[in-house]
Image: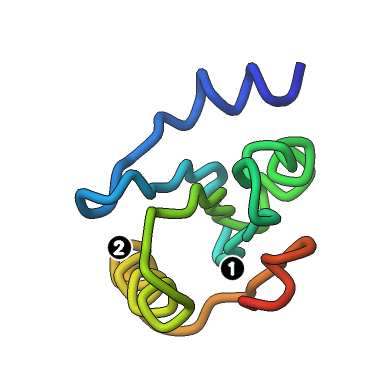
């Protein structure tokens, strides 16, 4: 149910041309970027965004197709700029933990 609500409330915003993008939920003053494992998207943690909606702007990442970790980190800088720059907190599960 939380995943369906996330998809309705936070449309997918593509970043670049490599298939990656983000869904943002919440209006709080703090920003949290959710990085998934290698397969799937951050959407799987939709219930986390619902719990934080009043305190955080939560960005659920779908990774782009890239040629390596350096390219992924550069894409994440594009994401940070899209979110307004500055500091963000990062939560990563599995491969996302390595990236975080």
Q: In this view, does 42 lie above or below 44?
A: below
Determine which of the numbered discs, if any, sits on residue 43 in the image.
Answer: none
| 88 relative position to 38: left or right | left
Residue at image location 64% in from the left, 78% down from the top? 100
| 11 relative position to 29: left or right | left
Q: Which residue lies furthest to the front in this view?
A: 67
Q: Quadrant of the N terminus?
A: top right
Q: For the residues marked 1 and 2, what is the alpha-carbon distance in whole angstroms?
A: 15 Å
Give the foreground label among 1 and 2. Answer: 2
Q: Which colour scheme is used?
A: rainbow
Q: Identify which residue, 15 or 71, lies in the foreground.
A: 71
Residue at image location 69% in from the left, 44% down from the top? 49
Q: Mark 1 points at which residue?
A: 30
- Dot 1: what SS? strand
| 67 relative position to 30: left or right | left
Q: Name the residue under label 2.
A: 82
Q: Residue furthest left?
A: 17
Residue 52 position, x and y percent, is 73, 50
């Amino acid at each position: 149910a939380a995943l369906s609500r996330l998809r309705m409330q936070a449309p997918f915003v593509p970043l670049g041309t490599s298939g990656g993008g983000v869904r943002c939920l919440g209006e709080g003053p703090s920003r949290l970027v959710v990085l998934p494992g290698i397969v799937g998207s951050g959407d799987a943690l939709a219930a986390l965004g619902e719990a934080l909606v009043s305190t955080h702007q939560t960005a659920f990442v779908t990774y782009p197709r890239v040629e390596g970790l350096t390219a992924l980190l550069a894409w994440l800088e594009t994401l940070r700029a899209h979110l307004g720059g500055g500091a963000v907190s990062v939560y990563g599960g599995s491969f996302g933990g390595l990236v975080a």
